[in-house]
């Protein structure tokens, strides 16, 4: 290379580096100043649902850590799809986040024939935040006390039994569909727009069974108005120590734990994702958070964005197989 050409390339490289310096500086400043106004955490299910309750545990403490209010915005409907679509199209600036769930990033993309977002390509995974097993409950008025007795009841009344869920595509829905497929029994799925109305109808006896997270049904179980038959976690839950696992109740390989994690729109700056991840991990590690969640039948869980991404991919594959087994594909 001639000296004149080498000199020209050197000058061009230095010029490019000088131009780039303010950009790197701006990125660092953006991470340090973020957030400068309230952050919205979109929860894909109604107020009072497990995702809402756990999302508010996070939002309250994250507000303190970030120095700005984290506002919970409930946008229920279509198994979390509406909320996920909204966040996927939001500005990638860290001010609109999704409190993603097993529904938005596991079940719904598998169960619906069409969703208008890609759970991998349209989001930046930030951090996981909690898991909650499903518990199989029936109204106290139903004459069954075990999973075996429930199966016998459903075989005796195949055209009269209904099972409720917090919505099509929810873990409650798929848990019920899998039970029907695995035990070769029949009950009609009745989806609700959130769990509150489903619980009301279950307590009245309008529907005969429901899988739901421990948090919303715990008080009813303790009061004796609902009867817990089995829990879908691999181990018994400390909040319900007398309730057997599905395996103990007679059904092997039936584990369904709802999970929750924070996702940002794709192309959210890496430094903002990193800051959010650090603060969410801090919240998940708080002893008070462990205690509050354990008392309500949930566990805190977190990790790196890469770990949440790997978990998401694993869940998508797992639920695609489950949907195929249960024959539960739905049109959107």
Image (cartoon, rainbow, N blue to C red):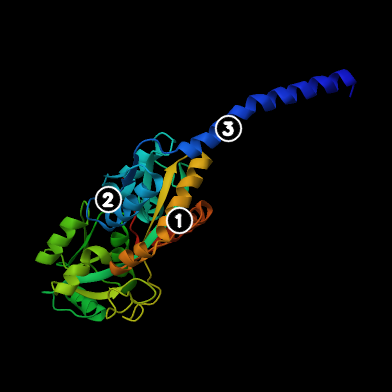
Work out whether mark 3 precedes mark 2 in sequence or the reverse, and give the earlier one: 3
Q: Position of residue 44 (x, y in %)?
A: 30, 48
Q: Position of residue 278 (x, y in %)?
A: 48, 51
Residue identified by numbered label 1: 281
Seen at 32% across and 43% down, the residue is 69
Q: Secondary structure at mark 3?
A: helix
Q: Residues within 10 Å of mark 1 (few under 14, many from 20)?
A: some
Left or right for 19, reference 238? right
Residue identified by numbered label 3: 25
Task: Write down the quadrant of residue 157 in the picture.
Answer: bottom left
- Report the front residue among 62 and 190: 62
Q: Position of residue 58 (x, y in %)?
A: 35, 53
Q: Secondary structure at mark 1?
A: helix
Spatial separation of the CA atoms under disc 3 and disc 1: 26 Å
- Report the front residue among 9 and 254: 9
Work out whether mark 2 precedes mark 1 in sequence or the reverse, and give the earlier one: 2
Residue identified by numbered label 2: 45
Q: Residues within 10 Å of mark 2 (few under 14, many from 20)?
A: many
Left or right for 51, reference 268? left
Q: Is residue 270 above or below residue 258?
A: above
Q: Is residue 185 above or below residue 312?
A: below
Which mark is nearer the camera, 3 or 2?
3
Can residue 240 be seen from the camera position used here? yes
Q: Residues within 10 Å of mark 3 (few under 14, many from 20)?
A: few
Task: Write down the quadrant of residue 39 in the picture.
Answer: top left
Question: Which dot marks residue 229?
Answer: none
- Report the front residue among 274 and 325: 274
Question: How many marks do you count on the picture?
Answer: 3
Can residue 157 be seen from the camera position used here? no
Spatial separation of the CA atoms under disc 3 and disc 2: 39 Å
């Amino acid at each position: 290379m001639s000296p004149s050409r080498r000199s020209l390339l050197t000058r061009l490289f230095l010029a490019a580096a000088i131009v780039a310096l303010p950009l790197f500086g701006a990125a660092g400043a953006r991470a340090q100043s973020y957030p400068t106004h309230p952050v919205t955490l979109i929860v894909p299910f109604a107020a009072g649902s497990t995702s809402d309750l756990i999302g508010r545990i996070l939002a309250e403490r994250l507000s303190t850590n970030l120095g700005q209010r984290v506002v919970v915005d409930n946008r229920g409907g279509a198994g979390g799809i509406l909320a996920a679509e909204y966040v996927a199209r939001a500005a990638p600036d860290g001010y609109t986040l999704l409190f993603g769930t097993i529904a938005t990033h596991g079940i719904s993309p598998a169960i619906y024939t069409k969703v208008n977002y890609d759970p991998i390509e349209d989001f930046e995974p930030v951090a996981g935040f909690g898991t909650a097993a499903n518990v199989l409950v029936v109204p106290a008025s139903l004459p069954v006390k075990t999973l075996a007795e429930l199966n016998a009841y459903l075989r005796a009344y195949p055209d009269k039994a209904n099972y409720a869920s917090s919505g099509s595509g929810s873990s409650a829905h798929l848990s019920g569909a899998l039970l029907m497929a695995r035990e070769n029994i029949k009950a009609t799925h009745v989806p609700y727009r959130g769990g509150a109305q489903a619980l009301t109808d279950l307590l009245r006896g309008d529907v005969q069974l429901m899988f739901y997270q421990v948090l919303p049904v715990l008080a009813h179980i303790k009061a004796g108005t609902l009867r817990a038959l089995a829990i879908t976690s691999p181990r018994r839950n400390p909040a319900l120590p007398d309730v057997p696992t599905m395996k103990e109740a007679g059904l092997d390989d039936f584990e369904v734990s709802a999970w929750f994690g924070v996702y940002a729109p794709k192309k959210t700056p890496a430094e903002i994702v990193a800051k959010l991840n650090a603060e969410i991990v801090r919240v998940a590690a708080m002893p008070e958070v462990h205690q509050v969640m354990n008392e309500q039948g949930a566990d805190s869980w977190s990790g790196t964005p890469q770990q949440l991404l790997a978990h998401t991919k694993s869940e998508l594959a797992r639920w695609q197989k489950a949907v195929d087994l249960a024959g539960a594909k739905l049109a959107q």
